[in-house]
Amino acid sequence: MEDTHLAEPTRDECTMAALAHFLQIITWWMGPLIIYLVKRESRFVSLHALQALIYQGLCAVVSMLMMVLLMGGMMVTTLPGTATEKASKEPPIVFFIFFGLFMLFWMAIWVLTFVLGIVYGIKASRGEWAAYPIIGRWARRFAGVSKNPQPAAT
């Protein structure tokens, strides 16, 4: 059964939760995974580490799909009978379009990872039960945290 009132996180929990967010900028999924495995008994740390892990997992899946599209686009444009003899000697324009979109996607993902890591790392270091949009609901469910946790009255 989920608690509606959770204890305020300790300084150590705030630091570990913040590290989970900050480390995803550099280590992708490895830093948050290690922190989750070491501190999973803490609901606060679990919530923050799981958010970073889920986000990194979604980035990996979408990146793989983009790579499949890039490779598929390259293969389709180089199939025999799809281009004229002159065009087959030059690199296909579709490759450059797909490659450009792929690179823009990667830059956007990196910027988003950087912003989320900094913003939610700061919130975690302050002891806030902040949640990523959409991903936060999944992490709350996995971590066993109530929807709107309130600090326990002292």
Image: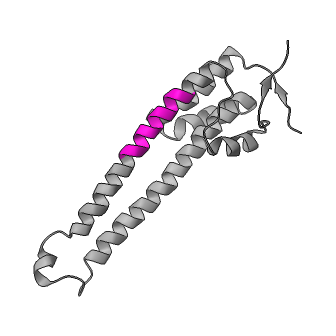
Q: Quadrant of residue 43?
A: top right
Type of secondary structure dominating the magenta stretch: helix
- Quadrant housing the N terminus: top right
Range drawn in magenta: 107-120
Q: Is residue 79 above or below residue 120?
A: below
Q: Is residue 6 above or below residue 93?
A: above
140 displayed left or right of 122: right
Reply yes or no: does residue 130 show up in magenta. Answer: no
107 displayed left or right of 43: left
Residue 118 in picture, x, y percent from top left: 49, 27
- Hey, which residue is sitting farthest bottom in the picture? 81
| Residue displayed at 55% across by 31% down | 21
Q: Quadrant of residue 124?
A: top right
Q: Quadrant of residue 127?
A: top right
Q: Is residue 22 above or below residue 102?
A: above
| Residue displayed at 85% across by 12% down | 154
- Hey, which residue is sitting farthest right in the picture? 1
Residue 48 in picture, x, y percent from top left: 64, 33
18 displayed left or right of 38: left
Reply yes or no: does residue 112 show up in magenta. Answer: yes
Residue 109 in picture, x, y percent from top left: 43, 45
| Residue displayed at 31% across by 74% down | 75
Out of 153 and 51, give the one closest to the viewer: 153
